[in-house]
Amino acid sequence: MKTTDSKSRIFIPQNLESDISSDDKKKIMRAIKKIVNTHTLCDEEWTKAISSQNFLVDLAFELNMNHERSFENLLNIFLGSFSPQFDGGYRMNKKNILIIPDENKKLIECMKREDESDSYYSGALSVNQITNPDIIYQNYLYGIMVNISSAANNTALSNVFNHCTSELLKNDALDLERGGWIHYRLPWITARIVLGFQNVLNNNRIWISSDKYEKIKKQTEIAKQSLISRIYKSEYWRSGAGNWVSKWESTGLCLEVFLDSDEDLTDDSIDNVIEYLFNDDVVSEWLPNNVDFSSEESTNTLLAQVVLCSVLYRYLKLSKWEKYVKWRMPIGKFFCNCVDYLATNDGNMPIRQFCTMPQILLYISKAIGR
């Protein structure tokens, strides 16, 4: 018997031959919740980075922890990133937003190295044509802040949400010619912003005016069409940032955007990407045989693999891609191995990035818990 989700989309039958068992899934979710309860949502290390706060907010909703005191404390930590201004607006306290030193500069350097070895981004998309590099990371920050500030219907959060939204809807933040947010060659930034706005449009977490709702909806629709146009060789989304963000993480985030509605999933371009990813020769590139946190490079690779695996696992719940169902079992086992490792080594793991564990826990929860 087939089941449907909240959007009446048909799911494939759940059977033990095509997936890990329901007991394994329950074990994964119990282990994730135990790890989060041990740290709490406002863990001092986890919440140092604004990107990590974003993942923790979504994780709280996945685990039904959004009414707990630690969730309120998490949002209070987030609000420390802003200062109210006399004119009624808000100013970002950049000193309270932990990022890698000179992160935007390093991102640009990665883009330069990519352009030196690959001529794909030529002309207007060349890094040498970027006149205001600060807008790139500012867009990314405001995108994740939109998601956090819409987590509860609260006056302080609403003020921050309105500030962030206004910044993202300015012409200076948008690529008016090609769609999406600056910079066009970095599709994962547009994807992250769209994912935040989709939470706002679909989950009724925060009240917004009908006028602002329509403006957000219009820009997200333009952005999604823009993302379709950026698919590389009908196969995947390049990151445009060299080794700063891998093509698998970029592809995972962009694909996640199109899980929002049936209409989005009718585009043949999405079919082409899914078909490419489930080619037997390609799967081995994004579905690992082991869990490796031994170095910064291996941890970043694993993180990208978890993101893509999570998104593809959710695609495989839909009947349209039933022909690839054989991959649910190995992906599910990969999730089991990841959570087993994290549960066993929690407290002994070197911190590669403050958002590493929250992001991994979130994306596995999104796949298994739904």
Image (cartoon, rainbow, N blue to C red):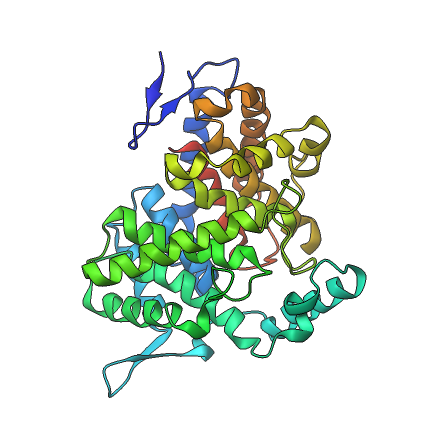
The residue positioned 47% from the left and 60% from the top of the image is 180
Q: Is residue 262 above or below residue 360?
A: above
Q: Quadrant of the C terminus?
A: top left
Along the line of sight, which residue is nearer the eye, 64 or 204? Answer: 204
- Extreme residue in the front direction: 177
Q: Is residue 152 above or below residue 302?
A: below
247 sits left or right of 1 in the view: right
Q: Is residue 183 above or below residue 191?
A: below
Q: Quadrant of the N terminus?
A: top left
Q: Is residue 23 above or below residue 259?
A: above
Residue 295 visible in rendering: no
The residue positioned 35% from the left and 62% from the top of the image is 146
Residue 174 visible in rendering: yes
The residue positioned 19% from the left and 68% from the top of the image is 155
201 sits left or right of 309 in the view: left
Q: Position of residue 114 (x, y in %)?
A: 74, 62
